[in-house]
Image (spheres, helix red, strand yellow):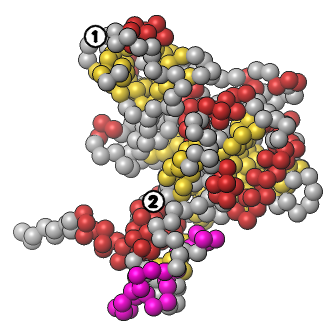
Amino acid sequence: MPAMPRRAPQGTQAVQRALALLRSFTTEAPEHRLSELAAAHGLHPSTAHRLLGVLEAEGLIGRSPDSQAYRWLPGAPGAGDAGSAPRHNGLRPLEPLRTPFHRRTSALCESDAWRDWSGYTCVETYEPTPEREYWAVRNAAALIDVSPLFKYEISGADAERLLDRVMTRDFSKCRPGRVMYTSWCNEEGHLLQDGNVQRLSRERFLVSAAEPCLRWFQDCGWSMDVDVGDVSEEIGVLALQGPRARAIAEAATTGIDFGAMRYFDLAAGEIGSGAGGGPVTVTRTGYTGDLGYEFWVAAEHAEALWDALVEAGQDHGLLPAGLLGLDMARAEAGLVLIDVDYVSAAHAEIEVLKVTPAEAGLGFTVKLDKQADFVGRRALELERDRGPAWAMVGLEVDWFELERLWSEIDLRPQVVGQSASREPTPVFAPGGWQVGQCTTRFFSPLLKKYIGLATVRGEAADPGTELDVEVAVGYGRRRARARVVERPFFNPPRKTAVAPTPGVKG
């Protein structure tokens, strides 16, 4: 029997990958974009970014402050060049990626609290705490930079056919000018991702996703008359969310009838009230469960869009909001987050971590009655017949229960004023075995309730079921009695209302 080839140690693999990236830079092709390098070498963009950062620190490549492209530095060794490398490059080494709105967001970030999002540096909270930003979403309006989303343009005669093959929704029912929220799975019916798909025209779509999936779309579209392009770095995205969002959007753009836009509609218009502001696509979507819009703009017009929205929002209490405030709002809306509330089947290290759309609370996105076959359909049909093993539910912990637990150490409950926790904690049958885990939880400032999103066994998922959830009490861990409730926790009528609403009630 021939010997099995030995796998290189993890450190050696990293060196090999870094060298492979370096060989991409030649005198004929001295400049490359991150997305191109990641796709060419089969790497996650954040992994490619870290490896390129090492090459930057060694003075082998550089990146100018106003460009997202990496370039081979003169005198540095590239493919076939074994010359010595300079130890510095005159540029900022290990520089994180910047969204098209970075100059605006960085000028306003008083807290200097940043978070990595797919290699981009994004604001966690502009102020020392996220409370004001959260309340702007619920009482006025907030502006959130969500540009790190991956964006793929799918076009061609078979564009709809490809989406119907990959996605669980029925795109034959999606007309131009509409957006569909959908999920997509592997062949075993396990969830890969969820995201929005905009139908820009009969043969042109834009898919937004939290993680890269270019190769998956390309592989599934093999032999089809379709083009799949990564436009992630070409488009900036701003989310304008809150009860005053419509008034601000109307003042900041022209050519769009916001009063006629339904939930998950899209429309094209212009930035500003005069000519020259640049084109913008607006979708009535968001991740806060409130009235809101998302603005999709070419990177060169991003700052003009930000400025127009900020100017229009001066009389409406508009504030920029970071990811912590967004996380609080999406938890109240009962919206799941990849790598927090569910693990993509592409990254799950053990089988039990893989879930189906139904088990992740996304069963409504699976359309088994559509004519087109799609990846994972047979497995999902079997699950429909037997029922999902797990369920995504909402949990509420009574305040008096928290008081009881904290009184045992002579303190009031230390839960108010905290951002949403992403640390999973066990969920038990009352006094019994573990039946699941709570993946997002916090004390809602608006609802005045301690709420959470949890994955539990199917038999423990009925509304009203009492369960025990583990909570931190001082330096210890205790079980608090919780009750299963329907999601979302917060669902105001203004989110989907179409007719004008004087006073913006709801």
Image quarter hosting the N terminus? bottom left
Residue 140 circle label: none
Residue 204 lies, in percent from the top left, at: 69, 57
Q: Is residue 253 above or below residue 387?
A: below
Q: Is residue 500 visible?
A: yes
- Taking depth in this image into account, of 291 and 105 the one nearest to the observer is 105
Q: CA distance from mark 2 to mark 1?
A: 43 Å
Residue found at x 57% / y 36%: 129
Q: Amino acid at mark 1?
A: Gly
Is label 1 in a helix, a strand or a loop? loop
Residue 347 lies, in percent from the top left, at: 37, 49
Residue 46 circle label: 2
- Taking depth in this image into account, of 198 and 250 the one nearest to the observer is 250
Residue found at x 40% / y 81%: 87
**Predominant secondary structure, magenta span:** loop
Is label 2 in a helix, a strand or a loop? helix
Judge left or right: residue 107 versus residue 435: right
Judge left or right: residue 285 versus residue 376: right
Q: Which residue is mark 1?
A: 431
Q: Amino acid at mark 2?
A: Ser
Which circle's residue, 2 or 1, is located before the other in the chain?
Answer: 2
Q: Is residue 393 above or below residue 123?
A: above
Residue found at x 66% / y 45%: 144
Q: Is residue 90 above or below residue 153?
A: below
Residue 310 lies, in percent from the top left, at: 79, 47
Residue extent of the magenta highlight:
65-89
Per the image, is 83 magenta? yes
